[in-house]
Image (cartoon, rainbow, N blue to C red):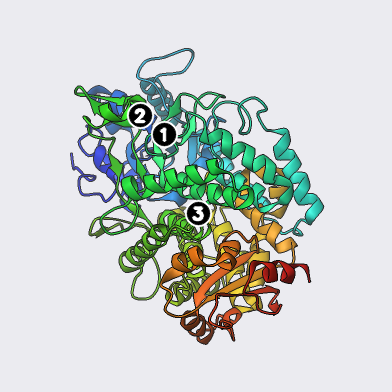
Amino acid sequence: MANRLADAISPYLRAHADNPVDWFPWGAEAFAEARRRDAPVMVSIGYATCHWCHVMARESFSDPVTADELNARFVAIKVDREEHPEVDAAYLSAASAFTGNLGWPLTVFATPDGKAFFAGTYFPPQPVAGRASFRQVLDAVWDAWTVRRAEVESDAGKVQAALAAAAEAATSVSDLPGGAELDAAVAQLAEAEDPEFGGFGGAPKFPVAPTLDFLLARPSGHELAARTLRRMAESPLRDPVDGGFFRYATRRDWSEPHYERMLYDNALLLDAYARAWQQTGEEWAERTADGIASFLLDVLRQPSGGFASAQDSESTIDGARVEGTYYTLPVAERAQLDPPPLDAKVLTGWNGFAIGALSRAGRILNRPAWLAAARKAADAVLTRHRRDDGTLLRTSLGDRSSEAGATLEDYGGLASGLLELALAAGDASAAASARDLVDLCLDAAGEGTCPFETPGGGDPVLEATGLAVHVDPSEGAYPSGLSSMAQAAHTLYLLTGERRYERAAREGMRLVAAQAVRVPSAFGTSLALMSRLAAEAEQLVVVLPEGVEGRESAGSASDLVSAARRHNAALVAFATEGQAETLAADGFTLFEGRTTRDGLPTAYLCREFVCRLPATTPQELSAARGT
């Protein structure tokens, strides 16, 4: 039996390399083998820090008897959902036709051309409480394939046709919501609030960072956002030792978390807590933001400067792998143990989230070390993940890069992060790189319905089998490729005045507007952008004298700069005079003519590029807003 996973970039795949299962990685070879054998395919999707993925691997995929049955009857494919998010999205959609209990590990049985005909999640090794064992599932699927083959293939075709129709309907063009509709979406979220423990709904309970993004962007949502964030900060979802947040809690009171800690959650929550401090000035928000940043910089940061995708929920204690025990120990006892391992692969889009969060939070809270970390991460990702033609790679591990193609999530996440870095640090190179990424995706879209497409197209296997989801608007845990790309385009409009960027942002959001106002919990980032699009955009540019090294020194010396850090304009930018000149020369017209007055930090408050008189004091800045 060939070991096809031993050399994989993905730590998740390598963890399964020594299973007795004859695993294939995702790719055309696996489906060619299924067609050659006329065998059904089992696609098993998970990720390295997933607790139940570990459990199923130990119970079933490491069992020789189960593996023999699987190998004899099926072609088994192992997929890291973080390396191949398009594959995960396609099969999650398919799985929804068979189970409402979606999650990971995701177990999908498909025809040799990839069409799903049965799916589930974790299956135990023995029947438990009415749940079939994994081997019983294998037997039932094999029986259906061999005895009722025509019915299976017909059902698979119907499922695929229904999914295609649903995907088309889900992205029908509609008008963008106005203020009343957006406030109604806030009210809908407020009705779902848990009045006793905070958060939304019952168990399991997630941090839902995109939903918080929308609430923070909407004045009617500020109080709900602050209340939710404070309760989360005080809950067992947050590690009190190093400040990082766990992925979710299994109980309504935020207790008994699943202990994996994801880069995307912690990056987006850093941004949320910094903005909560910006709005409230409360110490708990600043303290929590500091803790999250420490987790990112001390635990997830890699030698290259990029960030690992996650830290595992399990650690090895007394020779056994156990979930969560490490995190229940006090600091002194933790110090005697090896911490849970990292999934050290660097993902382009998720690193974009971290770059953006460290930049904006660093600007708001005056943390120069965070800005420096954002710069280093941006350099690392652009150096390692950007090809000579400007297109992106999805992931790397150390000095190796995966063959998995970048997705719209990667282009949008990185472009948005680079723009936040440019705004916080006056970095013209970061702004230009972000513009290049957005332009690539605009050019790739051509005259299609969606204004953005991934350069070079989507996953080739999904494209060949008709399974590709060309516009995936879902953003439960983090922004979708569509919303993050539209967000970047809107920021570019505010910096350049080029209407094509504003049109692209609006066209992208019109694809999901109707869904978003109906189900706001699933479209937080999109609704946050729609809220900005519904209002007259304020832009604030703060120009610093040359010779002041960084925004941090000026911030400590200038009441104006301190006030500007907490300003809630749609766009807040800091630059030295020289940086402003460079940005203006590179087409970022918001910076044209922006100079200091009397050698002092000087603020320009603009509405849709029409600017008030320059201000050098907080009082003048406040007066400019009132005119």
Describe residue 16's horizontal placement relative to residue 185 as left or right.
Answer: left
Front-lying residue, 50 or 306: 306
Q: Residue at 57% x, 24% y: name it.
A: 252
Decide: few, some or many residues near mark 1? Use Cα within 10 Å; few <14, some 14-19, many ≥20.
many
Instruction: Please say if the residues under marks 2 and 1 sit with CB atoms less than 8 Å apart.
Output: yes
Residue 82: % across, % down? 40, 47
Name the residue that disc number 2 marks.
327
Q: CA distance from mark 3 to mark 1?
A: 38 Å
Upstream in sequence: badge 3 or badge 1: 1
Q: Amino acid at mark 1?
A: Asp
Report crowding for label 3: few under 14, some 14 to 19, many 20 or more residues within 10 A (C-alpha).
many
Answer whether residue 497 is visible to the viewer in this image.
Answer: yes
**Does 272 appear above or below 332?**
below
Check disc 3 and give the amino acid type.
Answer: Ala
Count of numbered marks: 3
Label annotation for residue 217:
none
Q: Residue at x 46, y 34 (%)?
A: 238
Q: Amino acid at mark 2?
A: Tyr
From this viewpoint, which residue is outermost toward the top?
129
Instruction: Name the image quarter holding residue 388.
Output: bottom left
Task: Give the labeled residue for mark 3.
Answer: 468
**Between marks 2 and 3, how big is the CA–CA gap?**
39 Å
Farthest right residue in view? 180
**Sequence-wise first label, 2 or 1:** 1
Relative to 72, is 404 above or below? below
Task: Using the rendered image of the protein, determine whether residue 97 is visible from the camera's viewpoint.
Answer: no
- Where residue 520 appears, as percent x and y from the top left, is 68, 44
Looking at the rendered image, the quarter that the C terminus falls into is: bottom right
Residue nearest the viewer, comparing 254 with 401:
254
Residue identifier under label 1: 239
